[in-house]
Each structure stands twice: as C-alpha cells, then as structure tokens.
Amino acid sequence: MRLLALAVLLLALQACASTGDPGAVRSIMFDRADALGQVNAFRRANGLSELSVDERLNRAAAEQSNAMAARDRMSHDVIGPLPRRLGAVGYDWAATAENLGRGYPSYSAAMEGWIGSPGHRRNLMNPNVTEVGFAAARDTRSGRPYWTQIFGAERPPRTAEAFPSAGPILPR
C-alpha cells in the first residue's frame, strides 16, 4: 500500500512538473513600443535594418513566457521547439531566432543582458530577420519574471510564377 501511495505521489508530482501551474502565472505589462525602440536602436548602431512587430510573434512569445512561468523553468523547449511553436501561430518562417531571460526586473535589464551575451547578441544582430515579438510573464509563487523575444522573417508566399512550366504537354 505504501508503494502504491508513493507511486501515485510521484505521478502527481511529475504531472505538475510537466504542465506547470497556469494559475500561478501573471503577464507582465511593459511598453512594447519602447522594447521595439531599444531593439531598433541597437540594430541601427550596428548598421542593421530596423524590425517591425508581428502580432503572431507576440502570441508565440506570450505562450513561451507563460509556459516558462507556469513551470518556473527557463527552456527553449518547454512547450516544444521554436519552429513548431511558430507554425502553431501561423508564421511560415524563413529565418528565426529566440532570446529568453529569467529574473530580469525589466525589459531594459533583459535587453542589457542579451546584448552582453554573445549568443543572444548574435540573435539581435541577425541580418536575416525583419520582425520581432515580445512577451513576459511572472511565476507568482517564486516571483521570477520570464522574458521572451522571438525574431523572424516570413517565407514569401509561393506563386504560380515560382513554378515555371516546362511548356505544353503534347500528345504523342
């Protein structure tokens, strides 16, 4: 009986660890226009083009931040790989990158951390991206904030001109 109780307890704990507690998550409100301004100022200072905000990337970023906060765990794969997460919001990407942060008290602090980290800095300076999405959420149990930036460039739509015909098919 004791082993059965222990097994049930372990299964319950495993379920909590895998899904997290969505009730313990609060979105962090921040000025996305200011966040975009910070990203674009950094890119301009480094000779790169400015980005625009894409609402689908914002949704994907919110899902990522919420999932990390619910589990109180920072991971790029907490709810699946980035390409699958972008597909789920209808973003057909040609280039993409993601920056995550935990514990930063503000977007500006997260941005400073990303600029100071070689891998995150590389994502900020990716010349192939044209759009960005932002989000943040807090785990209300630990108080830790989780920040997400997702960069992308959408694949151009395929058209008939993209598939030139070999000419008419003639009967033999």
Image: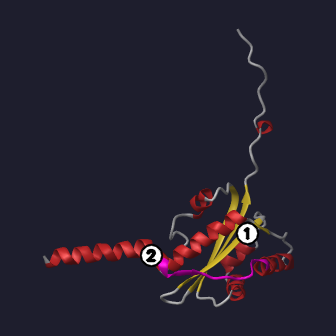
Write the residue at 28% across / 76% down: 10
In front of the other: 63 or 120? 63
Does label 2 or label 1 sit earlier along the sequence?
Answer: 2
Q: Can I make out residue 74 in this image?
A: no
Q: From mark 2 to mark 1, how far is it between C-alphas?
A: 26 Å
Task: Give the labeled residue for mark 1.
Answer: 132
Q: In the displayed structure, does residue 16 sit left or right of residue 8?
A: right
Magenta residues (range): 23-33
Label ID, residue 30: none
Q: Is residue 137 above or below residue 77?
A: below
Q: In the displayed structure, does residue 146 sit left or right of residue 132?
A: left
x, y (%) of residue 39?
A: 78, 77
Q: In the displayed structure, does residue 120 sit left or right of residue 163?
A: left
In front of the other: 138 or 84? 138
Q: Quadrant of residue 8?
A: bottom left
Disc 1 crowd rating (10 Å Cα; few below 14, some 14-19, many 20+) is: many
Task: Give the labeled residue for mark 2.
Answer: 20
Q: Is residue 89 above or below residue 19?
A: above
Q: Identify the secondary structure beneath mark 2.
A: loop
